Amino acid sequence: MTGVKFIFVTGGVASSLGKGIISASLAKLLQARGYSVTIQKLDPYINIDPGTLNPYEHGECYVTLDGAETDLDLGHYERFLNIPTSQENNVTTGRIYQTVINNERRGDYLGKTVQVIPHITDEIKRRIKLVAAGTRFDIVITEIGGTVGDIESLPYIEAVRQMKWELGNENCISLHLTLVPFLSASGEQKTKPTQHSVKALLEAGVQPDILVLRSERSLSPELKRKVALFCNVKEDSVVESVDVKTIYEVPLLMLSQNLDTIVLRKLGLPESEKPELSDWREFVDRIKNPLHTVRVGLVGKYVELHDSYKSISESFIHAGAANKCRVIVEHISSEKIDSENVSSILENLDGIFVAPGFGQRGIEGKIEAVRYARENNIPFFGVCLGMQCAVIEFARNVLGLKGAHSTEMDPSTPFPVIDLMEDQKKITEKGGTMRLGGYRCIVNSDSNSFRAYGTREIIERHRHRYEFNNKYLDDFTGNGMLPAGVNPEWDLVEIIEIPSHRWFVGVQFHPEYNSTVLNPHPLFVKFINACMAFRSEKTDNR
Ligand code: GLN
């Protein structure tokens, strides 16, 4: 681990200021200078992982290639850095305590009282150093969830203090993100909340080295000087982060204020190479200056909180940029769709996307949306539950299997076209027991999927329990819905397509977890492409 440098990112004043984006942006700049960087998220809640959380609680659950159910910030890390994260990149208080308690039962601390300090803080430090183990990374950025001053984040701040003390300020720096609110009544920007937040950090023994100030509008040099003076931070180490059009502009915004050089100097690292960001700039330019537009309906049941579908929305942005196209995503609640109103809700869309999900609520609306897309030859893309809905719809309305369903929603359906795998039937625990992480899939060479991927063997990430029921496979194939991708180990149908339709693809896996700025996901790219073609056909026919 020698030689690895650590950067800790904390937040104050308010939550949701975008620590994940700042961490990812800084990492991007350091990576663009030739350093190998990874980012870790420490979450101060007691769940072992966010896998059991409702998306309304905490936004989307992101899945890593090695099958960890993690915080959605890891999605930002991967999308910005274009390198995979793993189990070690997200640790919760629950996991920390679980380890310490298991150690205690095994007798590792025999004779000792087990306490927050040193046992919990030692375990936090061990988890931080674990990411840095080996020689994989030059720099590890650790983002601490929550807000400074919360009871639950105290042990983490103490761990940061200890690491700075052990490794020295030249190996370990702290970046603190706060909010500078604007009071419209007096027309002033206020620094007091930042001062208080830094005080809270100082009380816990951590002097921040860099401050990033979120604000709606630009901050004057006097204001930054004032913050620097009162927070005991160098003047050039106060950086502003004003609101921008797209999160992908943040690295460029940070670069314009030399955040990368400030960090490298503090860590005593050479800053020889200028950051190589031409692809990134091109990408931002494409987002800001699109040549085309399409309107896609995202049919789901968690539509009130857009964070629930974070990776999907970002995948649409990546795919839009690849097609020089602005993708307007209309979030449509499947609960509001029925057979009467479906056409009035979906008729102006250029493509229909049916989202992943769990449970009964809103399921019939999703199935109606699939039917509308299939019958009207509108580009369709279904992911996980979205694919399962496409299978159910086809069974009911094309194969005539009345009452066909997934056994998740209707355990006594006469036609269980989506069913549990044998292995899953024995499982009773909910946490971490789904089919999770990367699995192989062999793609049929005559399919829209193959035309997208350009290769027959792919690995995609999964997060589900239920599967296509192969008992019905011949019936589907004989009537025009084909398996376009199959897992070779278990013979599981992973992709379904309707070749007679202009573009109808359903996937059991989650392609959205694999889409990054530099590698937009091919299925999203081709889906948007199909939406563009459909839209121009509609305009030509008018
Ligand atoms: N509920 C479905 C299953 O468990 C689909 C899950 C999902 O969409 N992620 O199989």
Image (cartoon, helix red, strand yellow):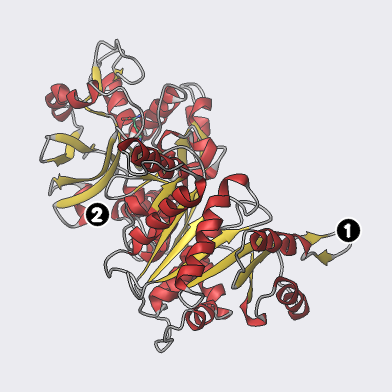
| Residue at (53% x, 51% y) in the render | 155
Q: Residue type at mark 2?
A: Ala
Q: Position of residue 417 (x, y in %)?
A: 24, 22
Mark 2 vs 1, N-terminal side: 1
Q: Residue furthest right?
A: 186
| Residue at (59% x, 72% y) in the render | 210
* Horizontal side of residue 75 vs 196, given as left or right: left
Q: Residue type at mark 1?
A: Ala
Q: Position of residue 351 (x, y in %)?
A: 41, 44
Judge whether 352 appears above or below 290 on screen.
Answer: above
Q: Residue furthest front?
A: 111
**Residue holding disc 1:** 185
- Numbered badge on residue 405: none
**Residue holding disc 2:** 452
Can you see residue 127? yes
Q: Is mark 1 within 8 Å of ligand 1?
A: no
Q: Secondary structure at mark 1?
A: loop
Q: Is mark 2 within 8 Å of ligand 1?
A: no
Real-space Cα separation, disc 2 to disc 1, in angstroms: 54 Å
Q: 45 or 520, which is in the foreground? A: 45
Q: 409 or 154, which is in the foreground? A: 154
* Horizontal side of residue 373 vs 475, given as left or right: right
Total numbered labels? 2
* Horizontal side of residue 513 vs 114, given as left or right: left
Classify 10 Å Cα crowding around label 1: few (below 14), some (14-19), many (20 and above). few
* Horizontal side of residue 280 vs 514, given as left or right: right
